[in-house]
């Protein structure tokens, strides 16, 4: 789901059906597409046989709009793999086509079009965004939050006024344009989103403010968490508003749905505020795992605190020593990874250490994230097993490597 809902016209999560969030543009399934594990929850899966979804007409004529989705291709046609269409007729301006054409993103009003530059691959999740700015008379296409193509000449607005929406094909368009693969979290906003908004929708996996005791995800994917044994609410001051307090051996916070953290060598970043109130015999701060209990399946302790108050951070093959954490003092910690720059640790906005790490061997599954506790006596890769005692606030997970400037901004709220 997009990070802003004020302009949201429709949203299909595809969690087991094609119902619109607002129950206005509910979809009808044709030729039995199915549902399977998606980027978030479930996605609709098109395996062939002329499968698609049809919804009532959405009025996008004579205005700005943004259409976003997660897509996963299992077959990539040399012609069109259609994501979204609303095609009244093959007449200039009256056939909205959002497709992958010749393996490139393609946005077209029929006669007015823009093409992306990046060749897409099969068996990969991509975030795609198609933006039309009526004031600028401009089309833009984004891939994984990055501008991938933009019109260089003025493009008049889309003019279609009566066709049904189709997802997975485009009616009245070229033959055999069916999408083969999965589509997830498809949304329509009635304004042109900025580049920074699209980047956030594509790469902010989850954001937990913990304000007023909330365990809800304020990011685009709604990966809401659960907690046991923590204190929260107005009496638990945070670095920004309120925080969670972990002060018992069984306390933990956990959330599920972290697809990108399960993809080997995929860039990621973690941002978190912590304030320890006691040194323990190995305090777990953050664990990523393939199961809710960390004594089975794939598991990696990303961040922990040793008995003498030293921050440790880990890869599958190595453990690293970080800075000393002062009791009862807030510290901002950021951990970033990319194949190019390896594993980098920041404290309070400043780079503390950079460790070469050309590969990240992930679980290949959708992951859990756990704060404050290993939930196992045996621990996992990285290996400290005790509970963390202290405050945690403003926890974010990204599916990209944050820059120094990004980290600095998060460290200075």
Image (cartoon, rainbow, N blue to C red):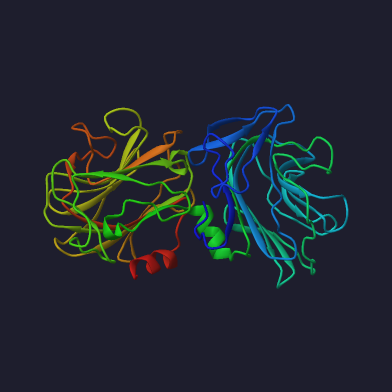
Residue closest to the eye, 155 or 94: 94
User: Residue 338, how many percent across, how many down?
Assistant: 46, 50
User: Residue 227, how many percent across, how many down?
Assistant: 26, 45
The answer to whether residue 336 is seen in the rendering is no
Quadrant for the C terminus in the image? bottom left
Residue, far front:
24
In the image, taking residue 292 as reference, residue 281 lies left or right, namely left
Residue closest to the eye, 324 or 282: 282
Name the residue rendered at 37%, 65% in the picture. 410
Q: Is residue 46 above or below residue 211?
A: above
Residue closest to the eye, 30 or 380: 30
Name the residue rendered at 61%, 33% in the picture. 45
In the image, taking residue 89 as reference, residue 28 lies left or right, namely left
Q: Is residue 374 above or below residue 394?
A: above
Q: Quadrant of residue 390?
A: bottom left
User: Residue 258, how many percent across, how many down?
Assistant: 43, 42
Q: Quadrant of residue 229?
A: top left
Q: Is residue 310 above or below residue 408?
A: above
Name the residue rendered at 42%, 41% in the picture. 257
Residue, far right:
91
């Amino acid at each position: 789901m997009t990070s802003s809902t004020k302009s949201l016209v429709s949203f299909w999560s595809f969690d087991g059906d094609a119902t619109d969030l607002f129950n206005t543009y509910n979809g009808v399934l044709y030729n039995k597409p199915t549902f399977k594990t998606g980027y978030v929850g479930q996605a609709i899966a098109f395996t062939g046989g002329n499968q698609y979804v049809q919804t009532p007409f959405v009025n996008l004529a004579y205005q700005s709009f943004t259409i976003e989705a997660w897509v996963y291709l299992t077959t990539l046609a040399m012609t069109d793999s259609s994501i979204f269409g609303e095609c009244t007729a093959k007449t200039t301006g009256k056939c909205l086509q959002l497709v992958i054409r010749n393996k490139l993103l393609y946005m077209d009003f029929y006669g007015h079009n823009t093409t992306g530059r990046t060749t897409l691959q099969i068996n990969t999740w991509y975030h795609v965004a198609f933006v039309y700015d009526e004031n600028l008379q401009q089309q833009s296409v984004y891939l994984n939050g990055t501008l991938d193509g933009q019109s260089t000449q003025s493009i008049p607005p889309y003019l279609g006024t009566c066709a049904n929406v189709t997802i997975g094909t485009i009616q009245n368009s070229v033959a055999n344009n069916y999408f083969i693969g999965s589509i997830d979290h498809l949304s329509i906003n009635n304004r042109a989103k900025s580049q920074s908004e699209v980047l956030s929708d594509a790469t902010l996996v989850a954001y937990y403010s913990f304000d007023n005791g909330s365990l809800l995800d304020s990011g685009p994917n709604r990966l809401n968490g659960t907690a046991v044994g923590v204190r929260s609410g107005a009496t638990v001051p945070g670095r920004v508003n309120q925080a969670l307090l972990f002060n018992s051996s069984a306390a933990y916070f956990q959330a599920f749905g972290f697809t990108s953290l399960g993809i080997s060598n995929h860039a990621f970043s973690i941002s978190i505020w912590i304030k320890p109130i006691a040194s323990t015999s190995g305090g777990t701060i953050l664990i990523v795992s393939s199961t809710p209990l960390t004594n089975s399946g794939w598991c990696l302790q990303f961040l922990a605190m040793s008995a003498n108050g030293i921050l440790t951070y880990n890869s599958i093959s190595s453990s690293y020593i970080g800075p000393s954490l002062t009791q009862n003092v807030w510290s901002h910690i950021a951990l970033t990874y990319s194949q190019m720059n390896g594993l980098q640790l920041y404290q309070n906005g400043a780079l503390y250490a950079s460790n070469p790490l050309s590969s990240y061997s992930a679980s290949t599954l959708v992951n859990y994230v756990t704060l404050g506790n290993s939930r196992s006596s045996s621990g996992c890769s990285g290996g400290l097993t005790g509970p963390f005692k202290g405050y945690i606030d403003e926890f974010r997970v990204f599916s990209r490597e944050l820059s120094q400037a990004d980290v600095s901004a998060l460290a200075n709220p």
